[in-house]
Image (cartoon, coloured by chain):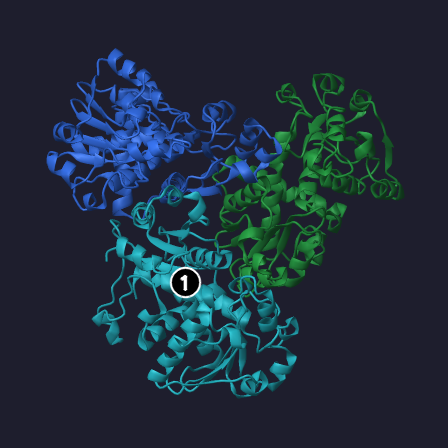
Chain colours: A green, B cyan, C blue
Amino acid sequence: KNHGCRVRCCAVQTHSAHSFLSENKFQLDDVIEAQQFDRDILNAIFEVALDMEKIEKNSQGSQILNGYLMATLFYEPSTRTRLSFESAMKRLGGEVLTTENAREFSSAAKGETLEDTIRTVEGYSDIIVMRHFESGAAKRAAATAEIPVINAGDGPGQHPTQALLDVYTIEREIGKLDGINVALVGDLANGRTVRSLAYLLAKYKDVQIYFVSPDVVKMKDDIKDYLTSKGVAWEESSDLIEVASKCDVVYQTRIQKERFGERIDLYEEARGKYIVDKGVLNAMQKHAVVMHPLPRLDEITVDVDEDPRAAYFRQAKNGLYIRMALLKLLLLGW
Amino acid sequence: KNHGCRVRCCAVQTHSAHSFLSENKFQLDDVIEAQQFDRDILNAIFEVALDMEKIEKNSQGSQILNGYLMATLFYEPSTRTRLSFESAMKRLGGEVLTTENAREFSSAAKGETLEDTIRTVEGYSDIIVMRHFESGAAKRAAATAEIPVINAGDGPGQHPTQALLDVYTIEREIGKLDGINVALVGDLANGRTVRSLAYLLAKYKDVQIYFVSPDVVKMKDDIKDYLTSKGVAWEESSDLIEVASKCDVVYQTRIQKERFGERIDLYEEARGKYIVDKGVLNAMQKHAVVMHPLPRLDEITVDVDEDPRAAYFRQAKNGLYIRMALLKLLLLGW
Amino acid sequence: KNHGCRVRCCAVQTHSAHSFLSENKFQLDDVIEAQQFDRDILNAIFEVALDMEKIEKNSQGSQILNGYLMATLFYEPSTRTRLSFESAMKRLGGEVLTTENAREFSSAAKGETLEDTIRTVEGYSDIIVMRHFESGAAKRAAATAEIPVINAGDGPGQHPTQALLDVYTIEREIGKLDGINVALVGDLANGRTVRSLAYLLAKYKDVQIYFVSPDVVKMKDDIKDYLTSKGVAWEESSDLIEVASKCDVVYQTRIQKERFGERIDLYEEARGKYIVDKGVLNAMQKHAVVMHPLPRLDEITVDVDEDPRAAYFRQAKNGLYIRMALLKLLLLGW
């Protein structure tokens, strides 16, 4: 896939020490789903993200994407994700075209197909970051567009940059991904993030996963079967304290009220069952961390925030570095 | 009209080979309606648009509008038009202030006049691109503002940049404007774009226009009378295939459901009557093109897209070049 | 307070002629409420605003905030205030992340606390400009954020940049603040701006204030008592012409319909009572000015606009300079 009609000066390293560069093994065209990444490319992306972290912390940003234009095409609003991508683009010197309510405001309301919208928007920009309410929309957009497309969440489907930042955070916080113990807590049935995370963790060695969730929102069999097929050890537990004491990562999630419809009683019951509080923190090891994709309601008590093991705001920040890395890789290459 | 209080370095060519420059004949203060342009100024704008096409295709954009600020003041949302203008400004190094739902969000909701809003916004920017729901709003804004105003559509009134990009596209695709045969198809009664296009085509020599539309949305008499008065040949036809075989341009438009109110039956009848499909394409000459202002529903079948004569996405892209040209001309002059 | 993790090159003047610099007396961390400013810091800010006025009028802007990113976090829309801040940032070379409807669109709708939102957004930006519907929200945000926060209005609470621009406008228009006579006209009970202005004027010497308002929206006792305690002379009057003839500034405000609920009759009665028209203008002295925070309905007739003493659009423009000054001071220091 070429990057539209615009001729860019993209330095191509042909004699790199890393064999994958000359082989172009890691060529990134689009970012559509977590499954597209293997362990090697994850590591390579994480190296670039680490460079981005240095750029962002030690200078007024970079100008490597100067002259590039990103279109944030959001069919449903997600301020957090949108601002993260737009900050990433601007920290690298790029510019942004924003539409945060494309479903209501745009030609989609008049019946235009996604494909037609993409063909128009790619004429105005160099890369499209799309959020959509339909599963599979990002794949359709990427199939149409001549320019790179990043999936910023498509309905109940994928949200691959969240999955990448989760794994990146574990590596940054714990120092390794092989041999770790991870507790996935909360809404495991509906949570897009925990499902993707479980999937990606299966790429690493000797990972042990604990599922801790209310009965109504247990992890589904497809992921359990997948983990088993990949040789990943997993078990279900109802003892959060005991699990927390054994884990490197306690990954808490929000029970999503909107999934319970009129059964508010079931929601309220599920919601209060597994809270990460000082008690859980006290059980945890010194090097372990608490993660959360945010937004957080009361499933992590606020007194946990001040503990250095509370990693969720650092995790949100890592989203910036991952997105900077992906924008750099998609627009300039490795 | 001066450009506010800001002193700009606007190189003025006083000894140009083109006499119109020294005469300032083409001085552009605002872009309000298609009628303000004559044939000579259209040609001059198209030359600048062609330069813009080269800038956009061959480099990372230009910085000629660096330091300039465009306010997109949209009283009704139109994502396509807004992104096109904002992309144009940013491709030239300029910056943008955006408001895409000014009707609901701004002081207009508290009863402020358009004139007061303009006086405030012109204090924050160097040029205003306005979309409004009322015919004539752009003219009022331009009368108030000390800085240039571009009409990005005012209700059932004008949408002059669409008209310009349509004519520019015909010239780019067919290579000429004199002596061409053009079919205007679809909703000719309500379509702002076909009315403006017919008006502008009357400025060229030996143009032949064919109207092909369902009875309920026929071209109105004012445009027919205008064409007759200008010596433009026109006729109505119900045979799209036959017309298509004779034309350089088949300009298809969407039947606008919202114009039919509760008469869904009339809408459905009108909608399916003239479809541009492979059959129409097969009747067309090799050099001819299909155009459409977009968004498109099913009045052009998707299998037409792959044919090189499908010009509608190139047409959308030409909107970018026309808008780049207008921003350059209004802010820096010829 | 440091500015997040980003290392900025902020030249610190240690041997300044102004003693306040070496003493760091005027260190600005956040802008939360009008009361935080004393007379000396107001004067110092106004000097910087005057520099900004020169930058904006005489050049294509400055690049001193190049590489800095401002997040406009608006929980309720206010296009005028938002565009003013965004223009200020861009005129200084900075970049902007915008969210203009955070209440509906963001995680706040899912129940996230303001504090959590701030912790996330500060990871993406260098300064936060926040508009909120709850009084005290800005103070909470500033207490959480490691980066500077500017209050762009928090419900019925504070709107300090409006108060600053009002006082700056009086100084620019009248040439002094000590010894001035000011008429506050219109809705004095609900108007946030007149309350803050009265508060700030009390910092100056020999100020005389006249309150001219319908009975239902009279100035409340807390401000009257405060003025008395500070030795500021004030009186109530029902004769606008007579007051106007004695004043340097006639500060008119809009009667806010939304405050009257179902009592439209009371609103209509209050609304027409004190109009600034040609008659009032004729009574005013040559050097005096009419001010208004805008938007204006019919409480100032449009024929007043052309008189050089109509200062309200210059006042709106001064908002730009004040905001440029504050952004500069908060991000780079004095």
Q: How many marks?
A: 1
Q: Is residue C259 left or right of residue B184?
A: left
Quick one: A315 or C101, which is closer to the camera? C101
Question: Measured from the top left, where is residue A121 in percent x and y?
Answer: 55, 59
The quadrant of the image that shows the C terminus of chain B is bottom left
At horizontal 54% and vertical 42% (from top left) the residue drawn is: A83
Compared to C219, does C288 lie above or below?
below
Quick one: C306 or A255, which is closer to the camera? C306
Quick one: C271 or A195, which is closer to the camera? C271
Quick one: B267 or B228, which is closer to the camera? B267
Given the image, on which type of amino acid does mark 1 rest? Met
At horizontal 79% and vertical 36% (from top left) the residue drawn is: A178
Question: Would you identify the image quadrant in which residue A168 lies?
Answer: top right
Compared to B102, does C1 lie above or below?
above
Question: Measured from the top left, where is residue C155 in percent x and y?
Answer: 44, 29
Question: Would you identify the image quadrant in which residue B48 lies?
Answer: bottom left
Furthest-top residue in view? Answer: C229
Question: Would you identify the image quadrant in which residue B65 lies?
Answer: bottom left
Question: Measured from the top left, where is residue B209 in percent x and y?
Answer: 45, 83
**Which chain letter matches label 1?**
B
Q: Secondary structure at mark 1?
A: helix
Question: Which residue position is annotated with label 1?
Answer: B324
The quadrant of the image that shows the N terminus of chain B is bottom left
